Amino acid sequence: MSNEITNYRGRFAPSPSGPLHFGSLVAAMGSYLDARHAGGIWLVRMEDLDTPRVKPAAADKILATLEAFGFEWDEKILRQNNPHRSDAYRQALAKLAARDAIYRCACTRKEINESGVPGVEGSVYPGTCRIKPPAGRAAKTIRVRTDDTGIGFRDLICGEIQQQVLSECGDFIVRRADGLVAYQLAVVVDDAFQGINRVVRGADLLFSTPRQIVLQKLLGLPTPEYAHLPLVKDANGRKLSKQSLAQPVNNAHPLPALLAAWRLLGQVKPEHDLGNPNEFWAWAVPKWKLSQVPKDSSMVSRLNLPAD
Ligand SMILES: [Zn+2]
């Protein structure tokens, strides 16, 4: 099947909870090269919605790193934490409410863990508050009502992905108890707002994609194409993340990290020395092949586990 796309609009959407580490560089590179190879637009979106986790100056540091590594983004950077976006998220919640697709939930994480079945990401929400929350309990969380329709999509790297959101995840959160809009809703609203038609990102979000498709359908928004890149693991086989205190990449020496990310993405070895990031990108953009990117097999096998 062809991976051609017209009027390509892609994006890199880091959360400013720390400096850019190697795993995020791989995601930035994959999305950038795939967009540029197709002659497309590449945007940067700062996912600074989760204010308790945002670190001061992290967004500026991430942008300085992207610049030092020679990334060039189109259009203005979109920041989630601004009044226009808050209005858009509120409107999306109102639309879901008008469709009777959401309800309030009073359950704590502990209660869900105790009663839930293990799912793709933590325990499956058992539906306790679907009819109404137990009397006398403050219900601050808002969940979306899911059903047992299977959600499927063809990931451009991982292949056919199927998930039954109700049984593998359960009704999921669209507004958190602290009043913040959940990541799943914000990302869907923002991808549509920015006209993103291909999402290239890390395989840690492969599990989230079916939930995002559920929201796109409920909100009448288009579903982009998806390509989930392999994750970078540390020596113990754990995903590199800001939480595991992965080392930030070194702005003073971008080329070794660029070449390491390129190799991790399964691309051909350079046949000559590349002296600096500009030379790297000029050489890499025409050479990029999405079909060469390896599948993150650990993620794919977890998602496709047959139901009991
Ligand atoms: Zn509940």
Image (cartoon, rainbow, N blue to C red):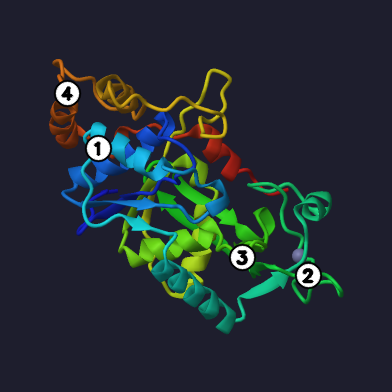
Q: Position of residue 148 (x, y in %)?
A: 64, 65
Identify which residue is drawn at 24% across, 37% down.
67
Report the residue marked by disc 3.
179
**Mark toward the start of the polypeptide (3 vs 4):** 3
Determine whether the residue tagged by mark 1 lies in a helix, strand or loop: helix
Question: Mark number for residue 138?
Answer: 2
96 on left or right of 269? right
Residue type indicated by callout 4: Asn
For disc 2, the neighbor class at 10 Å (few under 14, some 14 to 19, many from 20) is few
**Residues under labels 3 and 4: Cα distance?**
45 Å
Determine whether the residue tagged by mark 4 lies in a helix, strand or loop: loop
For disc 4, the neighbor class at 10 Å (few under 14, some 14 to 19, many from 20) is some
Report the residue marked by disc 4.
276
Please tell me whether residue 260 is drawn above or below residue 69 in the rendered image.
Answer: above
Q: Is residue 223 among the parts visible in the rendering?
A: no
**Mark toward the start of the polypeptide (1 vs 3):** 1
Whether disc 3's CB lies below 8 Å from ligand 1 is answered no
Identify which residue is drawn at 52% across, 40% down.
300
Residue type indicated by callout 2: Ala
User: For the image shown, how many numbered marks are present on the structure?
Assistant: 4
Q: Camera-side residue: 206 or 54?
A: 54
Q: Position of residue 120 (x, y in %)?
A: 63, 47
Report the residue marked by disc 1.
67
**Residues under labels 4 and 2: Cα distance?**
57 Å
